[in-house]
């Protein structure tokens, strides 16, 4: 009986500690929603909540490169990037949104995280040299020529 009480107390303490952490992760996930313009660049990400997952638009110099909706459960979604067939899957790892993009034989991993008031995107090509490039984005306005 005493062991059961200790176990119950331990789980209660762990639960009480972990709830604020889950709330912080959800808050950071919600913070990903918006329009993000690359610092010193022409790259823009627009991230929106949708009924079937996240709706993401990727722009380069105000021209749409990709526009798709995909669930965040890790399943593949068929999309087009610059008019070519591709697949993307997305899932959360804590507060970070992970996106795996497959175009032909090329696989690219992107990790989206809130960094202060901005968005940090770590881009890692998975099929060549594993060199991660970090890009910093600020909230901004997208001007897409759709």
Image: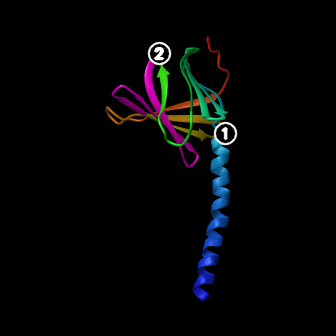
Q: Residue at x 58, y 46 (%)?
A: 95
Residue 107: x %, y % from top left:
38, 32
Q: Secondary structure at mark 1?
A: helix
Q: Secondary structure at mark 2?
A: loop
Colouring style: rainbow
Q: Which of the pair 71/109 is nearer the observer?
A: 71
Residue 86: x %, y % from top left:
43, 25
Q: Residue at x 66, y 51 (%)?
A: 24
In the figure, 95 relative to 143: above or below?
below
Magenta-highlighted residues:
83-108
Name which quarter of the figure residue 44 lies in: top right
Left or right, 130 with reference to 133:
left
Q: Residue at x 67, y 41 (%)?
A: 30
Q: Which of the pair 84/31 is nearer the observer?
A: 84
Magenta: main secondary structure: strand
Would you say residue 100 sits in the magenta stretch?
Answer: yes
Q: Which residue is mark 2?
A: 83
Residue closest to the far top: 145
Name which quarter of the figure residue 14 lies in: bottom right
Name which quarter of the figure residue 143 lies in: top right
Classify the position of the N terminus by image quarter.
Answer: bottom right
CA–CA distance between discs 2 and 1? Answer: 29 Å
Q: Residue at x 66, y 35 (%)?
A: 51
In the figure, 66 relative to 120: above or below?
above
Counting residues from the start of the chain, the first of labels 2 and 1 encountered is 1
Q: Are marks 2 and 1 in contact (CB under 8 Å)?
A: no
> Which mark is on residue 84?
none
> Disc 2 vs disc 1: which is toward the camera?
2
> How many residues crowd around disc 2 within 10 Å: few (fewer than 14), some, or many (20 or more)?
few
> Which mark is on residue 31?
1
Classify the position of the C terminus by image quarter.
Answer: top right
Residue 8: x %, y % from top left:
63, 77
């Amino acid at each position: 009986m005493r062991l059961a009480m200790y176990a119950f107390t331990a789980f209660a303490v762990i639960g009480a500690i972990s709830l604020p952490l889950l709330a912080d992760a959800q808050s950071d996930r919600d913070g990903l929603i918006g329009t993000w313009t690359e610092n010193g660049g022409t790259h823009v990400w627009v991230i929106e909540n949708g009924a079937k997952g996240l709706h993401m638009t990727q722009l380069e110099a105000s021209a749409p490169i990709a526009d798709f909706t995909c669930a965040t459960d890790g399943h593949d979604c068929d999309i087009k990037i610059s008019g070519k067939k591709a697949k993307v899957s997305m899932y959360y790892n804590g507060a970070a949104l992970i996106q795996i993009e497959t175009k032909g034989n090329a696989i690219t991993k992107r990790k989206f995280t809130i960094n202060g008031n901005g968005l940090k995107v770590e881009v890692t090509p998975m099929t060549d040299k594993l060199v991660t490039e970090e890009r910093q984005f600020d909230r901004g306005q997208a001007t897409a020529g759709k």
